[in-house]
Image (tube, rainbow, N blue to C red):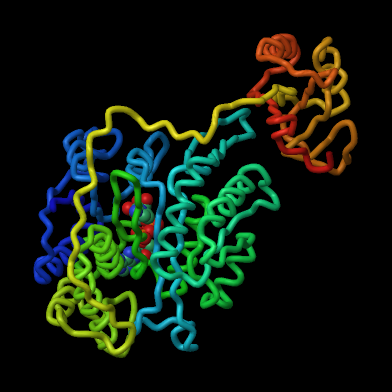
Amino acid sequence: MKIAVANGDGIGPEIMAAVLKIFAAAQVPLEYEFVDMGKWVFDKGFSNGMTPEAQRSIESLGLLFKGPMETPKGKGVKSINVTARKTWNTFANKRVFQTLHGVNTVFSKAGIPIDITVVRENIEDTYGGIEHMLTHDVALSRRFITRPGSMQVIKYAFEMARQKKARRISCGHKANIMKLTDGLFLDCFYEVAKDYPDLKADDIIVDDLCMKLVTRPDLFDVVVLTNLQGDIVSDLCAGLVGGLGFAPSANIGDHISIFEAVHGTAPDIAGKNIANPTALLLSGISMLLHVGLTENAGIIENALLYTLESGVHTGDFGDKSKPSVNTTEFADAIISNLGKKPALNAKTVTPNKPGTPTPFKLAQNAMMFSQDNQDVDITGVDMFIDSHEQPMAIAAKCQRHAGVKFKLVNISNRGTQVWPTGSVYTNLVNVYNVRFESLDGGALNQQDVMGLYISLSGNFKICSLEILNAWGGKKSYSLAQGQ
Ligand code: NAI
């Protein structure tokens, strides 16, 4: 089986060399095709950080093992890491955090074992990076949470939890505040849960989750979250088990999967051969398991655990009274321990069952949708206008534009209602949301909305608008605070 390998930037080439050396010593039956991706490819003028040949190789091989890559600072350049995950629809980011014997943490010292798998949605949310300056003062980010996208990652999380015989699967969210976006994700979670009655499924508000993770991490098993919350929670979990040097990550898609460490390029230690290759090695082990090379994965993981247990450590962790080893020496220690088993948490080694390589040529982009938009009515429109005026003055002007189709319902500023009722203690910025709904409650059409837009634009600069919909008669938009 052939896979694509990208060394990455900073410490990437050093830790990748260490891991591939261990793979070679363990006779992992993989061939590697090295591809050009990363900061140095940006610097050569490839605006997405990879060459067309690299893209072709990865799309035909279906598996990418990558080192960390630097995102050039400054506006206009997107992260190659995020681009890769999104372009190839690696919708589930799986990160496993386990107590490693020999890596001292507050919890290992207290005898509290940790075995948490975080599954983070990998495509949507604020990571869409769809952002606009509406005025000099006001920036807007659009946060897409979709039903098919949520179902895809949540189904993956449940299936993985069942396979690992998890005690519990929890959905972390903020649906108490973001009722429609996080609420949709949470609805999908419980919809999928119905198909897994053998698993204890529950949900927890993300701030409470963070508090409980740092006090009782042993209570959690599999946790699934939206993208940004998942990013933060998974770094928090990395801290629980000893830091970024021990945090592996798998980006799973239907056709292409990417395996990488959670950490970045560590520019402060790059080129010194002192980086800890454990996180990349753990990511590589999870890649071997993914392709059915269970025997190689088990042998390498046992050798790693044995090495950690025996106190061998790079400079970033371990017993400081013992001298640390460099990256190459650490890899060599693991190689010399191939075939040995750790005293604690030894992995069962089962014969390899390599799967068939997954990739096949797709003829067109897959469209994901759950059902057609039936029974949907336009009930109104939110107009986001640029104004320094007071709410009463804005309301008076807007009412004149409402015409025979619309009525002005309310005005809010940063999500807080300021008209028809409100408080003078609410501070304002220069973007108001002016909400119009149908005057007689009947359905509207897009021409009605455009008519209102044209009329209102005579008085205000309209920065943005959002059509208000009702599905099956149920209003599908949020209320303003205080409405
Ligand atoms: P970082 O993870 O590279 O470094 C944070 C700290 O952890 C540094 O002190 C570093 O020396 C240490 N560290 C990280 N990995 C280590 C290892 N294997 N062994 C020993 N110490 C290690 O995060 P930072 O500095 O915020 O980002 C640097 C660059 O990496 C940025 O350009 C960023 O965009 C990129 N990055 C790339 C990622 C990826 O490729 N998936 C993920 C995160 C950041």
Residue 478 location, x and y as percent?
72, 38
Q: Residue at x 55, y 74 (%)?
A: 214
Identify the residue at horizontal 85%, vertical 23% (top origin): 395
Q: In the rendered view, tell whether residue 241 sits above or below residue 456.
A: below
| Residue in front for this viewpoint, 444 or 193 | 193
| Residue 475 x %, y % | 74, 33
Compared to 261, does 90 lie above or below? above
Q: Nearer the viewer, residue 362 or 122?
A: 362
Q: Nearer the viewer, residue 451 or 73?
A: 451
In the image, is 81 to the left or to the right of 189? Answer: left
Q: How many marks?
A: 0
Left/right of residue 322 with respect to residue 21 in the rendered view: right
Q: Residue at x 74, y 9 (%)?
A: 455
> Residue 466, can we see it?
yes
Q: Can you tell which quarter of the image residue 359 is in?
A: top left
Which corner quadrant holds the C terminus? Answer: top right
Residue 295 location, x and y as percent? Answer: 19, 71
In the picture provided, is 152 more to the left or to the right than 463?
A: left
- State ligand 1's quadrant: bottom left
Q: Position of residue 65 (x, y in %)?
A: 23, 54
Is residue 401 visible in this depiction of the protein?
no
Look at 32% across and 60% down and name the residue there. 261
Q: Quadrant of residue 119?
A: bottom left
